[in-house]
Amino acid sequence: MTDEVILQVRDLKTYFTVDEGIVKAVDGVSFDLHRGETLGIVGESGSGKSVTNLSIINLIPTPPGKIAGGQVLFHGKDLLSMPPNEIRQIRGNKISMIFQDPMTSLNPFLRISTQMIETIQLHQGLDQKAAKEKAIEMLKLAGIPAPEKRIDQYPHQFSGGMRQRVMIAMGLSCNPEILIADEPTSALDVTIQAQILELIQELTHKLGTAVIMITHSLGVVAGMCDTICVMYAGRIVERGRTEEIFESPKHPYTRGLIRSVPRLDRDTAERLYSIPGQPPNVIDLPDCCPFYPRCDKAMDICKKKYPPSVAFENGQSASCWLYTKEAQNG
């Protein structure tokens, strides 16, 4: 990881209009991504992780969705204000994405060769032969056996783990600066999950690619991320270096997530901890701390106003009234 910031997300807001009201799926998210950095975005289902990253590459379906505000600066240029032809030159080229289920991402009617070669030709300007050679090289790097033969097969002829390897090869085939991985192992069994995560880590380090890893698993981010952003109800409630988040979590929600991770050094008779209650309904959410109904540290002020972000000396930050003078004086 270097000090060069290649992506800046500033006060990003993405809302969806439904019959019941306005869903504030992402509500003021900001973070930086450095060259070569692996950033983990964690949180329960419905916290806004995937919508954040679909917003970054401007793939929000409109309607019902709308990017209501903010900026996504890639090398200083705002991706959200770019015309469609310009963003298409970046999407899949400079910024690639791997989705949860490769079977829904790959076209079942086209050979792998057709799908990979089309992408490489579109963004790299290579002829058919050179593009196929590049595709075979990437499949080999991704651990696909006999890539020269398997490249001409269809997606259904690959196992789930092999299809995800194909998606990784496709995502990295244009040497992107950023790879967004949205729960890339959620549809795979545990042993294959470890192999896929190791592959992503190995290839991105080799190519110098920055990664945004979206997951609900703290075990995943502990093993491969440099920095963590914890999301809850559409906002980032805590961020910091991975080791510091695990050693000294500040937000009660982060503490709850860490306590919920199964550990081998715990008494097997001990009941596994889970955060009480359910994530909030983000339709017309009031401007208070959305975690307060589930929080064992909740105060009166938590029910009235959303907490400001408080910075700590080690570079961590958390949005929690526990660390503010206003709450302590009140």
Image: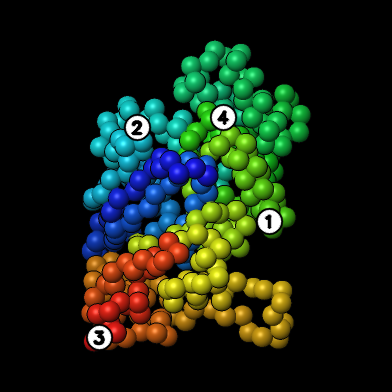
Residue in the foreground of this view, choosing between 153 and 76: 76
Instruction: Calculate the distance from the C-alpha at mark 2 to the C-alpha at mark 1.
Output: 35 Å
Residue tagged 3: 329
Q: Is mark 1 on a helix, strand or loop?
A: loop
Q: What element carries label 4?
A: loop
Query: Is residue 185 toward the left or the right of residue 60 in the image?
Result: right
Residue tagged 4: 173
Residue tagged 2: 87
Mark 3 or mark 4, which is nearer the start of the sequence?
Answer: 4
Instruction: Calculate the distance from the C-alpha at mark 4 to the C-alpha at mark 3.
Output: 56 Å
Q: Which amino acid does label 3 sit on?
A: Asn
Mark 2 or mark 3, which is nearer the start of the sequence?
Answer: 2
Q: Where is residue 110 in the image (x, y as percent from the top left)?
A: 57, 28
Mark 1 or mark 2, which is nearer the start of the sequence?
Answer: 2
Q: What residue type is labelled 4?
A: Ser
Residue tagged 1: 189
Q: Which amino acid does label 1 sit on?
A: Asp
The residue depicted at 28 percent of the width and 45 percent of the height is 71
Mark 1 or mark 4, which is nearer the start of the sequence?
Answer: 4
